[in-house]
Amino acid sequence: MNGALRSGVPPINARVAGLGGSPIRELLRIATAPGMISFAGGSPANELFDVAGVARSYAEVLAQQGPRALQYSSTEGEPELRARIAQFLTAKGVWSTADDIIITSGSQQGLGLIGQVVLDEDAIVLTENPTFVSALQAFALGGARFRAVETDESGMVPEALEEAIIRHSPRAVYTIPTFQNPTGVTTPRERRNEIADVLARHDIWLIEDDPYSEIRFRDEPYSPISSDPRLAGKSLYLGTLSKILAPGLRIGWIRGPQEVLETLTTTKQGISLQTSTIDQLAALHWWENHDLEEKLDPVRAEYMRRRDAMVDGLGHALPEGSTFNRPDGGMFVWASMPEPYDANHALSVAIADGVVYIPGSQFYVSDPVPGTLRLSFVSNSVERIHEGIERLHRVFAEDYRV
Ligand SMILES: Cc1ncc(COP(=O)(O)O)c(C=O)c1O
């Protein structure tokens, strides 16, 4: 590639010049067309944001500590917010102090920083297959390559993980064990322990991405894999306020060993100096003045109704022989249609019929399965979900011929 763009434009970094855009981003653009019912995005429901509460927090922060909120601040983040997050993680079983936390501008920045600091040219990252594509994009910035670990309906298979570690000598394992994006799969407790046993035996990083665990529909919190004390020196545990409070705030964090947090901090400094001071203080103010569980309960209840509306409709909408899950939390349902159905081919018909989803093949590291699709159940009301399901039914029953 040689960093060439086209004649007349000076060269740029050869590795990033070769990176393609994300086809998923293009779909998300289509998804905003008027009248379209989108099951494509992973955005929380607009109508469930606590707009008034967040407005109050910004106003009070400005009134009480205006100059501080408008000033530059530290790269690793506001100390009180780091302490609040440490408390939150400790309650989840991941024992932490403020010094174990760096604030990031959304967990996506955390993934990007890890891509640059922990992974370098040709480092291998083991991943679930399918997985969250934007993490792959972030890791690819450092030149990482990916290998899939066999997964089943309980997540990564521990024996397959160990085999892959021995075979590929990876630098890291990237996993989303709770309400995974894109499959909605959750790794049960026992399986988490087995994965921790494997990781404890090897000198590699665990990159555990956990944006969805608070969006749970059963009163059964899962301990993160990173809660295993044997992994304290090798786990990078990412969290975010995006799905709990609002993605527009861009507040996320990494909890990790202090040695590597120092390098992550210097790297963040080189990229962005810091995360917005006022946004951190407003988020902290909101968090300290609300009971998170009380705030999340109605959101969980509404998302669960939406999940049920979608899952109950899918049997009617998708071709006979399709399978799909009923996730215990998060935002996504994963469906598989039998051969020869192809979710990529059907997509243009679906868009013409006013409904859009993401073909599952977009999420695979290798061996994409054409009949799979990811459907988000959170961003539409139950009524819109019913209408979208009817449109999908029309797509597969009438308008799309395989
Ligand atoms: C698995 C996963 N990780 C990270 C992110 C990024 O979230 P944030 O808004 O905190 O950058 C998302 C967003 O959808 C996600 O699904």
Image: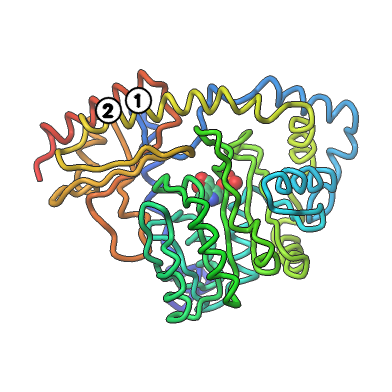
Mark 1, residue position = 309
Which quadrant would residue 269 be assigned to in this image?
bottom right
Name the quadrant of the N terminus: bottom left
Q: Mark yes or no: residue 224 visible.
A: yes
- In the rendered structure, the answer to whether residue 239 lies left or right of residue 350 reads right
Q: Position of residue 378 (x, y in %)?
A: 45, 31
Specify the amino acid type for callout 1. Ala
Residue at the far front: name it.
190
Mark 2, residue position = 313
Q: Mark 2: is the Cβ under 8 angstroms from ligand 1?
A: no
Please name the residue shown 73% across and 51% down the image.
Answer: 103
Q: How crowded is mark 1: few (under 14 residues within 10 Å), some or many (20 or more)?
A: some
Q: Which of 66 and 290 is in front in this view?
A: 290
Q: Nearer the viewer, residue 121 or 298?
A: 298
Q: Mark yes or no: residue 29 visible.
A: no
Q: Position of residue 167 (x, y in %)?
A: 43, 81
- In the rendered structure, the answer to whether residue 77 lies left or right of residue 68 reads left
Q: Are marks 2 and 1 in contact (CB under 8 Å)?
A: yes
Specify the amino acid type for callout 2. Gly
Q: Does residue 277 lie above or below 108 as drawn?
A: above
Q: Position of residue 234 (x, y in %)?
A: 65, 69
Cα–Cα span, label 2 and label 1: 6 Å
Q: Does residue 315 lie above or below 50 as drawn?
A: below
